[in-house]
Amino acid sequence: SWVDVLAPPDWNWASLLLSSTQPQNMGDHSEAGNNTPPGRRGGRPSKLHTVIVNNLSATPPLRPVQNLFDTDYVPVVVRLDEAVFTSGQEDLVGLQGDVASIATICAQMTFLIEKEAVLDEEARSDNLCDLVREHLNKLYEQLHVECQGYMPEAGVHEVLYATGLAFLFPSVVDRLQLERRVCQGKVVAFQEYLSHMAQLNQAFSMSQQLRDDCQSSNHKYIAHQVALLYQCLAYQNLRTQHFKRRIEPEFEDLKRTTEQAAVPQLTPKQREWLRSLTTDVMDVATDFSGPVTAFLHSWVDVLAHTG
């Protein structure tokens, strides 16, 4: 019990309380005497205070608190250094020896090659330059291993052109000082691929958001969202001019509806039109056999056989 914690069971509580309430020094409070200010009891701590401190410090805590950084603590996983293309491996060492693994290394090399070019342009010669070149050398060694695993009798040069990756990562070919070959047909390099996928994802995400917002009870910002979707569809490589032509004749009427009340509601006809439009955009954006994704056909052809 608390009594046992604060004092021994044979403690005389009456004498304890009496002694703890008696002034210890009622003498002169001047500088020559006690320095305790007037009106405040001075002297040593009471016996009750001493017993409490001694007993609490000698007993275990009522509730143990676990240290955040004990062995059971799970740290946050940082994935900043992971490859753009992943083959399900956390380390490049010992990948599958397939096109996806080779493309993973080429993608990483492309970013480092661009960084190396910027540093050379700035005429920098510090540890960062050395670090970039060191990583490029390590990636080249791994690229050589993966190419050997994919085509044991061929070199890096032959494998990159046999798989079509040489056309998708031209900066890697130049950095390795390999022979350039002429490609028949349209080729989309890696940076163009990333830009196109970003635009495609933006159009898809905006359409999905608009379709979900059709069910909302407040359509105040629908016109603004449709304007953003129209801007997403303006990217010429998406080939979505027909969607823009569907938006243009309906936009002013949609805007007037959203500005007529504090909590505006689209008409059933406008809801159906918007639902149909956004569904069509999402279907086209995810159809890699259609015209919207024709810009990526060179990538589809190369990566279709990576399984």
Image (cartoon, grey):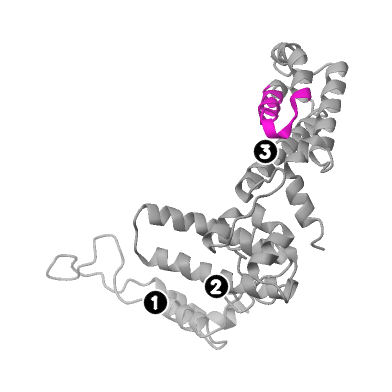
Q: Residue at x 57, y 82 (%)?
A: 60
Which comes before the other along the chain, label 3 or label 1? 1
**Quarter of the picture holding the C terminus:** bottom right
Secondary element at image label 2: helix
249 vs 105: above or below: above
Coordinates of residue 260 in the picture (x, y in percent): 71, 11
Coordinates of residue 216 in the picture (x, y in percent): 79, 28
The residues colored magenta run 224-242
Which comes before the other along the chain, label 3 or label 2? 2
- Tell me, yes or no, if residue 29 can be seen here: yes
Coordinates of residue 287 in the picture (x, y in percent): 84, 41
| Residue closest to the eye, 163 or 27 | 163
Instruction: Residue type at mark 1: give it.
Output: Ser
Q: Is residue 296 magenta?
A: no
Q: CA distance from mark 1 to mark 2?
A: 73 Å
Secondary element at image label 3: helix
Coordinates of residue 45 in the picture (x, y in percent): 36, 76
| Residue closest to the eye, 29 or 226 | 226
Which comes before the other along the chain, label 1 or label 2? 1
Q: CA distance from mark 3 to mark 2?
A: 33 Å
According to the image, label 3 marks what residue? 199
| Residue closest to the eye, 124 or 43 | 124
Q: Are marks 1 and 2 in contact (CB under 8 Å)?
A: no
Specify few, some or many for label 1: CA neighbours under 10 Å numbering under 14, 14-19, or 20 or more: some
Q: Which mark is residue 46?
A: 1
Q: Residue at x 57, y 87 (%)?
A: 9
